[in-house]
Image: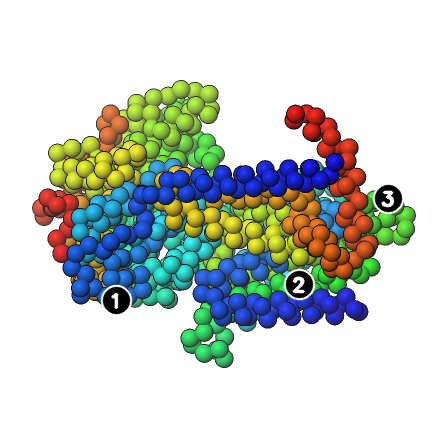
Amino acid sequence: MRSLARNLGAALAVAVLVVILSIKLNTFRDYQIAEIAIYVTAIAGLTVLTGLSGQVSLGNGAFMAIGAYTTALVLMHLGWPFFAVLVVAAVVTAIAGAIVGVAAARLHGPYLAGATLMLGVALPSLSSVYPGVFGGDQGLNVVYTTPGFLGPNFPLTRWQAWVCSAVALVTLVLLANLSRSRVGRNWRALRDDEVAAALTGVNVARARVLAFVISATCAGMAGALLAIITELVAPGAFTITLSIALLTGAVIGGLGTLPGAIWGSLVIVLVPVYATDVATSHGLSTTVASNIPVAAYGVVLILVMLIFPQGIQGGVQWLLRLLGISGARLPHEASTADARPSAGETPARPHEKEGTQ
Amino acid sequence: MKRPNRLRVPAIAGIATAALAIAACSSGSSSGSPSSGGSSSAALTASAPGITATTITIGSHQPLTGPAAAGYSEIAPASNAYFAYVNAHGGVYGRKIVYKYLDDGYNPTNTATVVRQLVLQDNVYAVFNGLGTPTHLAVVSFLNAQKVPDVFIASGCDCWNQPTTYPETFGWQIDYIREGKILGQYVAKHFAGKKIGYYYQNDEFGLDGVKGLDMEIPKASVVSRQSYVPTNVNVAPQVAALRASGAQVVVAFSIPAFVALLKLNSLKLGYNPTLVSSNVGSDPITLSGLLETYAKAGGATVNGNQLTQGIISDGYGPAVGDTSNSWIKMFKMVHDQYDAKAPFDGNVLYGLSAAYTFVEAMFKAGRNPTRADLVSAINSGLPQGPSVAPYAYSTTDHAGSTGAYIATINNGVLTQQGPVYVTDPTASGAVTTFTGAEQQAPASGIPAP
């Protein structure tokens, strides 16, 4: 109960911060806030799946596509209000997640990665197979406007930032609650040792499918939000690159931690934009400048992984511990988070050192 | 044990970051920021977003990386080279043009993001020459809702010509329906009685082209219609179907990569029809480069120039190989001075010509233009400049060039054959020979105000 109150408090604080930022900053920054919130929603779902239940997915971009196309089709043909559409998108992707989850629950490691990879590659191509319904490569246009009560001069991007952030925060609070509950404990047990978990009475298959359903639902909602901010749903947005970006965000932020989903999203959205600005403002030749964002993104990923193997959230916790603010984390989390890297570090590092010198 | 490790890694990190920062700064001298405004800035005001007393800032979305980057990534730097030339010679009424083009990787979702950045954050005056049909479709309604001039799109989709729905949007190159009609008329006349096959990209680009072809080529002589999607590079089934249908002439509305794939797959089957390709897919330098690369990847060696020999296509600007043409001379001079690293090919010429048209429109928009002034300047018509046929621009027509000539690839150079034809995008409109005169390039290289 205490942790729920704390999570709600934190979410409320972030919500106030988002509202203030969205008013203070320009309308393009609002658009970026919305983009970040979308990534947070999708990555939070993935980090729960991979970090807690131990299943990897390279196909969450495809679930985003399902959510986005559902949104576009419902808005186009039925014209429902967005929050109703969001619920429909969540339900449809949850069903898709359940179907994939049932198959995925039988697979492990590279086989699971391969199966989800196939989903990520193949599903968006359906739009080219049925261009009449999905609009082919050009996709479907989405019309989304600010609600009337805000007046005609309210910036659309600010409203989009609010909607996306609200969905992201609600998702984070629910996931935080879930991961502390019996369900979350079951996932951790099954991630660490499936046989032991089964022996203690965890229904392994059900827990694994449930993790997939929740992860897919989050991705579906993120896809619905993406549809209304870009006002377009096209297969080009849901390539395998997106699925990999989501996994990258989860890992770089700190796998299995929800604050990590926020750090990861910030890196994914802001680093390329910042690098482009730096590259173009220095008058580099086009061939160099156009590749700098990609290179900078790569460098940031390598650096974060080198310095903080536990992701940015791991780094933040290390920093807090260094400053003596250890109360920021719970003791049992500390023990599980630290046990493995330090155990692996001690024997590995000396060898490495010998090798390099 | 632990401490040195922890120190070592941040040290590496620090050095790497510093190196990147230095690399980013090292060549920070050229272009970009405008220096001292120059003469007679007395009456110049900040008359619109993106316009200051000394600068005009415009933006664009371009495929600088990704699948469409080959060839097309040369276009924006070429436009920028022409703007640099204009800036060095007095600018537009003394204002310098600042051209900010961002990479969208030919992905419509990225286009949505970068165009919002240009409009909402960088406050560009206009979006110029945004490249691609699927990409630009993602932002056309956004730009019109924001009332940002959306000029000279680098795509021949007929969809840009909707002045009532999209009053801010203007095409530039000949639209694919007109181009299809001109190619179709040539094919119907020169290959009468032969079996004809179509090979096209399954989107607005290919479908518009086919629409134009069907207006001129008798339905009965078309024996096979094969389409592809750009995400699937296996076109062997399509080529086999064309061969099985016995098509003696294949008309392609496809991007360069898929013309190359068509050619190589035909070669493999020993199938050798006469190839007719729309201008989009027929730049000889791009095409022969792709042919050689793909063949190499497949373990074979081919001569690109030999394979492209005799391909029939069309052109709507001066032919690159026509060194006596005044436009080619003028653009070559600008290119050699400001963009010498890029090859002087069809893509570069395209970027230079589009930039010339934009400067023409800016002069016409007046000394202190609003965004609406630019739109009405184009609505009242533009001189044809380097284009071989007049532009269609009026308040009721936002299509670009109205005509083209037939050309063949000869020794790696696209060479004009016969006169320039003009037409309209309707089924009833005839394809006629253009009787007006071509314009000469201005001696100064800058359009007259």
Judge by depth and name the residue closer to the eye, A194 or B94.
B94
Tell us which disc is closer to us: 2 or 1: 1
Q: Which percent across, then down, holds residue B372?
A: 25, 66
Residue bearing the label numbered 3: A195
Relative to residue B360, is residue B64 depicted above or below? above
- The numbered dot on residue A171 is 2
The reply, left or right, for residue B159 in relation to residue B352 is right
At a point 45% along the width and 74% down the height, the residue shown is A154
Quadrant location, the N terminus of chain A: bottom right
Amino acid type at image mark 2: Thr
Of badges 3 and 2, nearer the viewer stands: 2
User: Which residue corresponds to the image point at 38% horizontal and 46% vertical from the top-left?
Assistant: A282
| Left or right side of A276 for B223 | left
Residue type at the position of mark 3? Val
Q: Say which residue appears at 54% left-offset and 70% top-offset.
A: A20
Whole-percent x and y of residue B436? 9, 48
Count neighbours of disc 1 (C-alpha within 10 A) and say few if under 14, some if 14 to 19, many if 20 or more.
Answer: some
Q: Which chain does tag 1 point to?
A: B
Nearer the observer, disc 3 or disc 1? 1
Q: Position of residue B286 (x, y in %)?
A: 33, 33
Q: Give the numbered dot on residue B103.
A: none
Indicate the amino acid at tag 1.
Ser
Image quadrant in which you'd find residue B261:
top left
Q: Are marks 3 and 1 in contact (CB under 8 Å)?
A: no
Mark drawn on residue B47: 1
On the image, the x and y values in percent for residue A223 come to 57, 57
